[in-house]
């Protein structure tokens, strides 16, 4: 009787269908996998099921895992040197086949509108000579994954987006900076390049930080508390909320873009990161370098690449309304990030547009990021990585001597006289400095400022200075205290 009742109960109980095999968002046809890596491949499935991943590049390119109690599985797939196309087959309760898979170099590209800026004209697009650039963009080994702009109040494991090979029909939608970077790498390295693009215009750095990292910084506290309240009030987000339309969960809030647009991609195997952001954080300039370093470290940890290169852009000239030095201070904070290993900064003082916060010359920005990668990451020492980077500022008699690294064959001026240098006295008064080249350094002076305490360069919001190295790469903006004169050697 009891057995019969149990059988009837089982018969009429709702039957739960085990979840079908799923792959994480980046594992699709046309993707690029990082070469010579133990590449994580992961997804979801029915707990207890076995998942087998096989790749066509070698007979023994095979890995398997058992789906855990949370419904998650993950394997490490040994990838070969660059090449393809390959096929990857994933078998579980169903079979997934990924075609046209390339193996090469993978970079995650993020930031705000200047990274989001596309090649084709539009509300967030249009580069110099865009018609010619699009017409000749036949680079099928460059692949671009565009992460849809969404927010989330907790870390997600899934998102939309597809891998697109680079053709004249598709490239207009690509991040322009990322594309021009990839074009240089593909040509110089002769390998496929994968671009994972996650950016959103007008967003601050806090929105791209994990919640546990943002929590360490007092300026992030109000919006992080707002996110936590939103999560408590609505554990499941509506589509309108996901798109950032809810004022209680805006895309500028701490952690919401990391949760929705970065976390789903970790720990995909990649080479490094590109970052173009900062315009939205000028008010946080004194803290910005600390924030960016914390973001870098957190991303490297999440993607399990603790030494990965992180190359970024020093913001371009623009006539910000009411600027009182915030732009210069932000540029200086960005320069200070270079004290962190495996970083590099593309300078844009000469390619910006003071009337347009979105300068159309994205070609040089991408190329300059690629210079850092080619020199520092790929060992192409013949490629000059950067324009001059200030090393020290020291009193030299009645003058101030500014010395530089990254000389690229020597310093040159693009005009008859050097512009953009300033001296600051103890009262905070700023004086336009007279400047002259002296070998591999610049001498500054101003009779009205005989005891300067700071020297600065490129500090005005829209200032477009003229100091370069012989590779025609511009010097980076800076502000440094004037050190006492060095003692003469006996």
Image (spheres, rainbow, N blue to C red):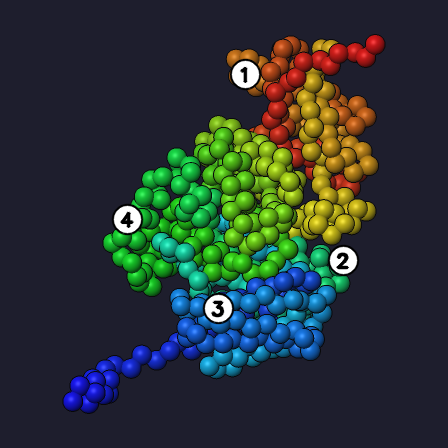
Residue at point 46%, 42% (across, down): 280
Give the vertical position of 431 relative to 162 (above or below): above
Q: Which quadrant holds residue 317?
A: top right
List the residue tagged with mark 1: 429
Q: Bin the neighbour count of mark 2 within 10 Å (Cα to Cα): few under 14, some 14-19, many 20 and up.
A: few
List the residue tagged with mark 4: 229
List the residue tagged with mark 2: 188
Query: Closer to the N terminus: mark 2 or mark 1?
Result: 2
Residue at point 48%, 28% (across, down): 324
Q: Secondary structure at mark 2?
A: helix
Residue at point 61%, 68% (across, down): 77
Q: Bin the neighbour count of mark 3 within 10 Å (Cα to Cα): few under 14, some 14-19, many 20 and up.
A: many
List the residue tagged with mark 3: 73
Left or right of 426, for residue 224: left
Q: Secondary structure at mark 4?
A: helix
CB under 8 Å between discs 2 and 3: no
Q: Of discs 1 and 3, which sits in the foreground?
A: 3
Q: Of discs 2 and 1, which sits in the foreground?
A: 2
Q: Secondary structure at mark 1?
A: loop
């Amino acid at each position: 009787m009891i057995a019969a009742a149990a059988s009837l109960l089982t018969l009429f109980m709702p039957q739960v269908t085990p979840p079908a095999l799923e792959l994480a968002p980046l594992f699709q046809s046309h993707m690029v996998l990082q070469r010579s890596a133990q590449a994580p491949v992961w997804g979801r499935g029915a707990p207890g099921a076995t998942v087998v991943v096989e790749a066509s590049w070698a007979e023994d390119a095979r890995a398997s895992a058992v789906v855990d109690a949370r419904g998650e599985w993950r394997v490490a797939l040994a990838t070969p040197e660059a090449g393809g196309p390959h096929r990857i087959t994933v078998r579980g309760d169903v079979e997934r086949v990924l075609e046209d898979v390339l193996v090469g170099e993978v970079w995650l590209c993020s930031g705000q509108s200047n990274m989001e800026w596309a090649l084709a004209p539009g509300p967030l697009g249009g580069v110099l000579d865009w018609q010619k650039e699009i017409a000749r963009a036949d680079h099928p080994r460059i692949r671009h994954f565009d992460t849809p702009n969404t927010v989330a109040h907790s870390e997600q494991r899934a998102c939309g987006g597809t891998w697109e090979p680079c053709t004249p029909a598709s490239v207009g939608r690509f991040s322009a900076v990322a594309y021009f970077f990839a074009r240089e790498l593909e040509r110089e390295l002769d390998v496929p390049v994968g671009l994972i693009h996650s950016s959103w215009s007008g967003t601050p750095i806090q929105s791209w930080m994990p919640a546990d990292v943002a929590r360490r910084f007092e300026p992030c506290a109000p919006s992080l508390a707002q996110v936590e309240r939103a999560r408590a009030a609505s554990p499941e987000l509506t589509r309108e909320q996901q798109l950032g339309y809810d004022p209680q969960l805006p895309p500028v809030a701490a952690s919401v873009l990391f949760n929705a647009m970065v976390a789903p991609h970790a720990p995909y195997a990649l080479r490094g990161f590109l970052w173009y952001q900062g315009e939205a954080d000028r008010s946080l300039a004194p803290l910005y370098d600390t924030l960016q370093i914390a973001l870098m470290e957190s991303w490297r940890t999440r993607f399990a690449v603790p030494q990965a290169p992180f190359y970024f852009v020093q913001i371009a000239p623009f006539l910000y309304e009411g600027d009182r030095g915030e732009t210069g201070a932000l540029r200086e904070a960005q320069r200070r990030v270079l004290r962190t290993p495996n970083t590099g900064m593309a300078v844009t003082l000469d390619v910006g547009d003071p009337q347009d916060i979105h300068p159309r010359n994205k070609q040089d920005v991408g190329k300059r990021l690629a210079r850092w990668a080619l020199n520092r990451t790929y060992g192409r020492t013949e490629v000059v990585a950067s324009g001059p980077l200030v090393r020290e500022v020291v009193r030299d008699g009645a003058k101030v001597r500014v010395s530089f690294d990254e000389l690229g064959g020597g310093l040159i001026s693009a005009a008859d006289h050097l512009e953009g240098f300033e001296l600051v006295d103890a009262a905070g008064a700023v004086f336009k400095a007279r400047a002259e080249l002296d070998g591999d350094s610049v001498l500054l002076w101003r009779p009205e400022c005989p005891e300067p305490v700071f020297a600065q360069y490129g500090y005005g919001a829209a200032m477009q200075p003229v100091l370069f190295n012989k590779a025609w790469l511009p010097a980076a903006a800076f502000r440094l205290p004037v050190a006492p004169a060095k003692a003469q050697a006996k």
